Image (cartoon, helix red, strand yellow):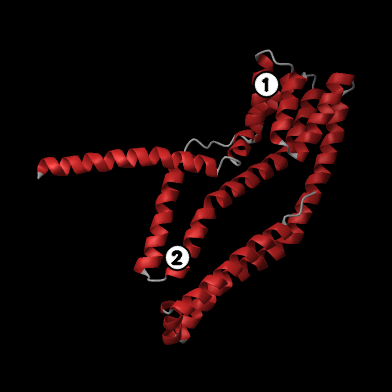
Amino acid sequence: IIISSLLVFVAVLLACQSGGSVWDTVTSRYVADITPMLDSLSIDHSTLPKYMRIWGISLVAAFVIVAFVLRMPPVALAAVYLVYVSPRIILDFMIRKRRAMLRDQMVAATIALANTSRAGLSLAQGLESIGDETPEPLSTELRRIVHEYRHGRPLSEAIRATKERLKIESFTLFARAILVCLERGGRITDALERISHSLQELQRIERKLEVDTASGTKVVYILTVFPLLFLGISYVTNPEGTATLLHSISGQVIMLVVIALTYFSFRWSQKILAIEV
């Protein structure tokens, strides 16, 4: 009995290990189009395989709990789908947050770089100086430019490569102004002062758009949560009728349709409210 139990344990362990490698391959393809964006923005995703394994367990757990424990097979389809799309939603949010932070930090960094140039420092020295004072994540990008320059790469090529990698409007304006001065000549101080004013105006417009769409975003969130609140109120006021809705197949199909309409309406509204300058 002991030997057979050990053999079963070893077999299960080997199956889990082989299955884990296969699952890692599947999940790497699932986020293959997002991974380059994480790399371009210097977002650490070394722990992503571990979280994707947890995601796989959550897919199975969501189906088992909703379909067999709660006895709602139609709703289990919606639960599995919501868990399925959750990694991409989270990663997209991380990318948007990172890009917004870089955009907002560019204004102060450009003003500080103009001050270092006015004080007599070279462009490389100014980038190194503000790189130590600028908060993350922009400091990582500035230090990366200085690191490449110190290892023999021309400063203009390092700035151009960062511009192509980040693809952020504020950094693109900053890089173009610097590159024009480096390649065609001109006072970098004056160029930095002009570009700092342009970035301030761009930031003002972007924040105004965020304020103008904030009320619409709140309404979307409220309407998204409202069906769940309505279901809770219905359960308090009419528990028998709500129980019939939850336990009958027709009621569960209706819940599946409501969840689907709510989800796709939320995603559609997010695209409508995603106004870019």
Q: Which residue is rendered at x = 49% and y = 43% of the image? A: 27
- What label does residue 146 carry, if any? 1
Q: Which residue is rendered at x = 72% and y = 22% of the image? A: 158
Q: In the image, 144: left or right of 208?
A: left
Residue 108 quadrant: top right
Vertical comparison of 188 with 167: above or below:
above
Query: Which numbered disc flags the more N-terminal residue, 2 or 1?
Result: 2
Q: How crowded is mark 1: few (under 14 residues within 10 Å), some or many (20 or more)?
A: many
Question: Residue type at mark 2?
Answer: Ala
- What label does residue 187 carry, if any? none
Which of labels 2 and 1 is toward the front?
2
Q: Which residue is rendered at x = 38% and y = 40% of the image? A: 20
Q: What element carries label 2?
A: helix
How many marks do you count on the picture?
A: 2
**Tag 2 residue:** 76
Question: In this orientation, does residue 111 appear?
Answer: no
Vertical comparison of 210 with 137: above or below:
below
Q: Which residue is rendered at x = 68% and y = 12% of the image? A: 152
Q: In the image, 87: left or right of 8?
A: right
Q: Residues within 10 Å of mark 2 (few under 14, many from 20)?
A: many
Question: In this orientation, does residue 18 appear?
Answer: yes
* Residue 119, image x, y percentages: 79, 22
* Residue 46, image x, y percentages: 49, 35
Q: Which of 33 and 175 is in front in this view?
A: 33
Vertical comparison of 181 with 271: above or below:
above
* Residue 215, image x, y percentages: 71, 65
Question: Residue type at mark 1?
Answer: Val
